[in-house]
Amino acid sequence: MKYYRSHVLVCVDPECLQKGAHELVDALQDELVATGLIDEVQVLETSRIGGCSLGPEMMVYPEGVHYVGVTPDDVPYLVEEHFLKGRVVNKFQMPTTKIVDEELGAPTQKEVRIVLRNCGKIDPENIEDYIAEDGYQALAKVLTEMTPEEVIDTVLKSGLRGRGGAGFPTGKKWQFTRQAPGEIKYVVCNADEGDPGAFMNRRVLEGDPHSVIEGMIIAAYAIGAHQGYIYCRAEYPVAVSTLNIAIQQARNLGLLGKDILGSGFDFDLEVRMGAGAFVCGEETALIASIEGRRGEPRPRPPFPAVQGLWNKPTNVNNVETYANIPQIILKGPEWYASYGTEKSKGTKTFALAGDLNHTGLIEVPLGISLREIIYDVGGGIKDGKAFKAVQIGGPMGGCVPAEYLDLPLDYESLAQAGTIMGSGGMIVLDEDTCMVDVARYFMDFTQDESCGKCTPCRVGTRRILEILTRICDGKGQDGDIELLENLCQEIRTNSLCGLGQGAPNPVVSTLRYFRDEYEAHIYEKRCPAKVCRALIRYEILPDACTGCTVCARNCPVNAISGERRQTHVIDPDTCIRCGICMQVCNFNAVVIE
Amino acid sequence: MLNTKPSIPANDPLANPEQKKLIDEILEKNKNLPGATMVVLNELQSRIGFISEAMQQYVADKLHVPVSSVHGVVSFYSFFTTTPRGKHTIKFCMGTACYVGGMPQLIDKAKSLLGVEPGQTTPDGEITLEVCRCVGACSQAPVVVVDDKIVGRLRPNKFPQVLRTIQDNKQ
Ligand SMILES: Cc1cc2nc3c(=O)[nH]c(=O)nc-3n(C[C@H](O)[C@H](O)[C@H](O)COP(=O)(O)O)c2cc1C
Ligand code: SF4
Ligand code: SF4
Ligand code: SF4
Ligand code: FES
Ligand code: FES
């Protein structure tokens, strides 16, 4: 094997690809060949490093220097400086994030990377890289030194709770599955990650697939399973292929298959793909889908731990849950439990999205406050706007307003505030967001994804969507709010699965905190955030308009008239309020009335 | 038993020897897997591009499952389509970030340029418009996916450029 003194990892995620990551890789290769360094410096492709919008991004190891925005033209200079002369090129270094807004206090805690520790650092397609980071050591320890009961005990002690949404204690679930009668058992990894805005699991699967595989083998040993499935959504083809490569490499090294590491324990793994149904993230629907059927949930109990895949006891855990396991085994449950709060231990990944300065993936210790996440980690609200709410937990979650900014992030506090931890979607909304529109958006999602098996969910979500749409359209009626409340109650109590039971949450939580906005829409026919199309009017400010004609050329319905260099005018009757003119005007001449 | 198996239309993939061979390979490779129906349908969808009525019948026969259950599976999952689609697909991300980031406006622009709605294919069979859920590139909202390529921060006035790229690739 060649010995490389340096490794360059270039991010080839969609965002970096778009900014020319492949061209950068090619240029680096060429330059390294030209300078004769190709046997010393290895260029590897990796996934998401972190800065995202600044891409293309690369990390240089062993120094751990993070470069961004390098173009192929810069490569000769960079190679000469960094690899020949050994000097870090400052101008391409990732700008260090500055702490924003003194007023809100300096951070008391930083991000802690347990699940994401290897992401962007190792080559996910090379098992050796994972092994070099203590990979599969936990498995070796488990197989040689620990009984299944001891493994379960360790996981129990760590306090780890399921990261897929509900937060059920993982050790307990393993215990139930182990104790369930039956010879044949299965372990399943839920990689269906369907919440809009969520991509934490994809990131782990693409960046550190072996951590999930190792976690699953350990779970299988603990519960006595010999076959496992990773159910991955079809929208993640890269994750599927990375997983398949990883599984094959693990098999080649005897880490999967018969007699793993000479321990006598057999276990193998297969990836199965979904086909675009959100409800398949629900564990009983997921099981039906792996079995090759329509992904319709069924009532629980019996829980999958007792009667799951092909009616055998089955342990279903989320990607992130499994990815925590190797570290818990290696560093001990006390170490893991030292992060977090009394009832919510460890760390959680979130996909921070929305109106923030720094969006992207984060991993924080539980118990951190929302304020710290938004203002410290996320760098505060974009464009100096005011914070309005944060939506946590996806379509089954809720919106939390400003007065809860100091809420500690743990399962119980979030429930009290009317939302759920969920799988890690976190969307920050600024003052320009209409909360009725947000509720409508999520209801549109759930009613579309309702599998239709039970009436309250199928009909009820459609009814709610109709009412919300009518409110946004300026046709809300007296009594609509009460009607919504009754429907929400009805759906929540009478639906079969978590989708229906959680579907009302976005409506209930916005009604709880932003009732006045609903009232403004219904009684005053006014959208306070100026979002709802039927309730706003676009106008051009004569003083600001330069007559550049850009708006008129982009208006889809030709509602804008005006000669070149003359003030333009919008015909309100033709205008469909699409907002394009406002987006394209370079002179801020278009305003909403 | 009534035997009303529909005959295979001339333009069906099953009537094309090359595609039939591929279909048979997919079935042969997976038929003994537990839960084979999903695996087979997923592969057919991605390799052939759609799953026709006749193909569903064929799969049911080969896997020894009732055709109704194959129909049931195909109709349940949004990835499975029963008719061919345009040569290119433009998917509009309707995830939260993109929605808030101006996706409705972008779709309006696309509709006005192409004359078709999401879910439809242009009459020349070139482009299918679709909406999709979050594709995981939210920080670039609004995002469209042209075939497999993500195009981010797409303002309505840049949309014609996207169409031009598709047309250029055609030649
Ligand atoms: C509608 C719906 C969608 C769900 N989607 C997911 C998902 O995408 N990923 C996930 O891990 N769990 C999802 N869950 C939760 C699963 O049913 C299950 O609780 C979880 O996979 C258990 O793993 P954990 O204990 O590790 O969290 C969903 C639940 C519901 C009701
Ligand atoms: S609650 Fe909704 S998604 Fe769940 S089973 Fe019923 S109809 Fe299907
Ligand atoms: S784009 Fe702006 S400045 Fe140009 S004509 Fe329209 S309103 Fe006037
Ligand atoms: S809002 Fe849309 S329809 Fe109305 S004038 Fe502007 S571009 Fe035209
Ligand atoms: S997409 Fe490349 S670092 Fe984020
Ligand atoms: S919302 Fe469009 S990429 Fe996530």
Image (cartoon, coloured by chain):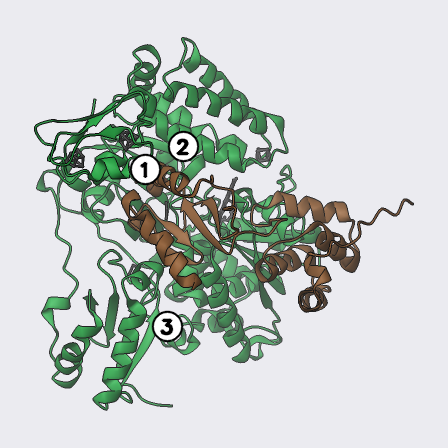
Chain colours: A green, B brown
> Label 3 neighbourhood size at 10 Å, few (<14), some (14-19), many (20+)?
many
Between A465 and A534, the residue placed more toward the observer is: A534
Single out the mark in the foreground, 2 or 3: 2
Q: Are marks 1 and 3 on the same chain?
A: no
**Does dot 3 land on a helix, a strand or a loop?**
loop
Q: Tell me what residue is drawn at x 78 percent, y 53 percent.
A: B65
Q: Position of residue A252 (x, y in %)?
A: 54, 79
Q: Kindly identify which residue carries mark 2.
A: A441
- Chain letter of mark 2 equals A
Ligand 3: quadrant of the figure: top left
Three-letter amino acid code of the residue under disc 2: Tyr
Alpha carbon of mark 2 to alpha carbon of mark 3: how far? 38 Å
Residue at 16 percent of width and 33 percent of height: A563
Q: Is mark 2 within 8 Å of ligand 6?
A: no
Q: Which residue: 76% across, 52% down?
A: B57
Is the residue at mark 1 in contact range of ligand 6, meaning its CB lies under 8 Å from it? no
Residue A280, x across and y down, in percent = 56, 46
Residue beneath disc 3: A123
Task: Identify residue for label 1.
Answer: B100
Q: Quadrant of the N terminus of chain A?
A: bottom left
Residue type indicated by callout 1:
Val
> Circle 1 sits in a helix, a strand or a loop, which is it?
helix
- Of all residues shown, which one is farthest toward the right? B1
Q: Are marks 2 and 1 on the same chain?
A: no
